[in-house]
Image: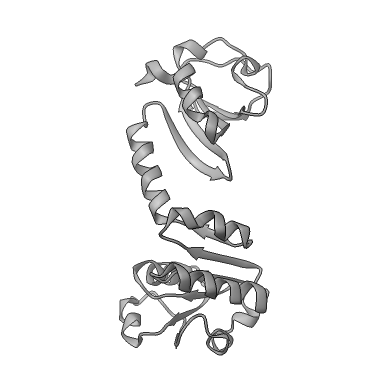
Amino acid sequence: MYVVIMGCGRLGAQLAELLSLKEHDVVLIDQSPSAFEKLGSGFNGLTVVGTGIDIDVQKKAGVDRCDAFAALSSDDNTNIMAAQVAKEIFAVPKVIARIFDPKREFAYHQLGLESICPTNLGAEIVQNYLESDRMCCRHSYGDVDVIEFAAPKAMAGKQASAVEVPGAVRLVGICRGEGQQIIGADTVIGEGDRILAAVKHAYRQHFRLTWLKHNS
């Protein structure tokens, strides 16, 4: 895979090294030559000095033929503009941008851009730690959270259909002992089973209070 990364901060440098170690072709763009000093010996790609929103700079880095572009600078506006250039002008198949302001995430999605927000991720990690005995959010897709939790006593002996809520909660997987399986509507839940469920974000607190409040 040919990947172009804009921004050689700690995140960009770390990602570049990880991809290089997996033998991907990586090019890093940064307007400061000294930024590339963060790269370790594991990086075997190329570097380009320049502004990542500049079309000529992106073309020099090979964005016009790359498989993926990541805008990871420390400035939200620069990231969104660089991501738009890569997506709209060079039609890069995979484009992702880092944003620091959670309020801008919706705007990114409206533009058809994938984004990662360290603020949201950090808050989610802390929340998962605080709620680790009850449920842990593994992924979020729009307004749906994929959560994992240990089935409480109140849920034991019930069929999955008794726990699910149409349009709000869907149990999708179960881990019992060393075995894993997809949950069906008639699957009987055992206390302590590890359950994977898709829950509407707006319903998550209600689900926790209904089933998991005694797990804390």
Colour setup of the view: one colour
Number of numbered discs present? 0
Q: Looking at the figure, which quarter contains the C terminus?
A: top left
Q: Is residue 90 visible?
A: no
The percent position of residue 170, horizontal first and vertical second, equals 62, 28
Q: Looking at the figure, which quarter contains the N terminus?
A: bottom right
- In the rendered image of this protein, does residue 148 appear above or below residue 4? above
Could you tell me which residue is drawn at 62 percent across and 21 percent down? 164
- In the rendered image of this protein, does residue 214 appear above or below residue 36? above
Q: Is residue 76 left or right of residue 163?
A: left
The percent position of residue 10, horizontal first and vertical second, equals 34, 68
- In the rendered image of this protein, does residue 127 appear above or below residue 73? above
Q: Is residue 91 left or right of residue 144?
A: right
Work out whether residue 179 or residue 14 is closer to the camera in this orientation and state it: 14
Q: Is residue 39 visible?
A: yes
Work out whether residue 149 or residue 78 is closer to the camera in this orientation and state it: 78
Work out whether residue 60 or residue 209 is closer to the camera in this orientation and state it: 209
Could you tell me which residue is drawn at 41 percent across and 70 percent down? 75
- In the rendered image of this protein, does residue 72 appear above or below residue 133? below
Could you tell me which residue is drawn at 62 percent across and 18 percent down? 160
Q: Is residue 115 left or right of residue 13?
A: right
Q: Is residue 112 left or right of residue 118?
A: right
Please tell me in which quadrant of the rendered image residue 145 appears. top right
